[in-house]
Image: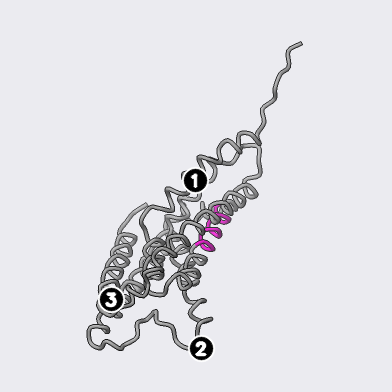
Amino acid sequence: MQLSLGHDPAMDFAGSLPAFVVAVVLISASPGPAMALILRRAAVRGFAGAVPTVLGLEAGLYLWALFAAAGLAALVAASEVAFIVLRVIGAGFLLYLGIKAWRSAWRSRRTVTAPGDDDEVPGESARGWAKAFGEGAVVMLANPKAAAFMIAFYPQFVPADRPLFAMTALLALLQVGIEIVLYLVLAALVGRASSWFRRSAVRRRLDAVSGTVLVGLGVRMAVDGR
């Protein structure tokens, strides 16, 4: 007697996970606003200062994944007005962060003892944490390319007979977990040299370079089409 083995969607999903993990690692390692924000924050504030930025970025990413699963991201990507509005907001925020870094570099040239925008104010650590978290979340949520990416990326790994929302939420959790680990390792490596980065001359150059990178990313987001 010949046995006929049925198709197992669970095996298909499990088999696609290695490809998903590799794709996430490659995407996470690519240069962009998230990487620039994390590197600057870790260099200036050390590992602990970079943690809220990483968590804010990943919270924004997870929300975009849920929006994609619910169909909201598709509406944003399809709407010319919504796409342009998000692009302007995202570009404006990156320009704001870049100009803020430039101002910090300029002030440090005028007086060695002037604190930078990211220097901790005594008694305001909770506010600083929330501010860094919010900056990360806004950078991610105000990127319209994230909407288009989520729409195209996750369905490739969701079996046709599985619920799209639940599976996307699960895959997004896996991506968030992978990226948090990778970004925190990066922040820890950079943070080990944070005392050197905080030296006046080094901090001034760091602010100038990171400001230029953020402004450049903001300009590129503003002029890029779909």
Q: What segment is highlighted magenta in the picture?
A: 58-68
Give the secondary structure at mark 3: helix
Q: Nearer the viewer, residue 164 or 212?
A: 212
| Residue 105 spot, x, y in % from top left | 27, 78
Is 99 situated above or below 86? below
Question: Who's the residue at 51% across and 59% down the image?
Answer: 180
| Residue 100 spot, x, y in % from top left | 33, 77
Q: How far apart are marks 3 and 1 (CA)?
A: 36 Å
Question: Who's the residue at 28% across and 64% down the image?
Answer: 216
Q: Residue furthest right?
A: 1
Magenta stretch: helix, strand or loop mostly: helix
Residue 102 numbered tag: 3
Q: Which amino acid does label 2 sit on?
A: Gly
Q: Nearer the viewer, mark 2 or mark 3?
A: 2
Query: Would you identify the image quadrant in which residue 197 lies?
Result: bottom left
Is 165 situated above or below 126? above
The crowding category of the residue bearing disc 3, from other C-alpha atoms within 10 Å (few below 14, some 14 to 19, many at least 20), is many
Q: Distance between the residues labelled 2 and 1?
A: 43 Å
Q: Quadrant of the N terminus?
A: top right
Q: Horizontally, is 185 left or right of 163 in the view?
A: left
Q: What residue type is labelled 3?
A: Trp
Query: Would you identify the image quadrant in which residue 120 lies?
Result: bottom left
Q: Does the magenta stretch include residue 98?
A: no
Earlier sequence position, callout 2 versus callout 1: 2
Residue named by callout 2: 123
Residue named by callout 1: 153
Question: Who's the residue at 45% across and 55% down the image?
Answer: 146
The crowding category of the residue bearing disc 1, from other C-alpha atoms within 10 Å (few below 14, some 14 to 19, many at least 20), is some
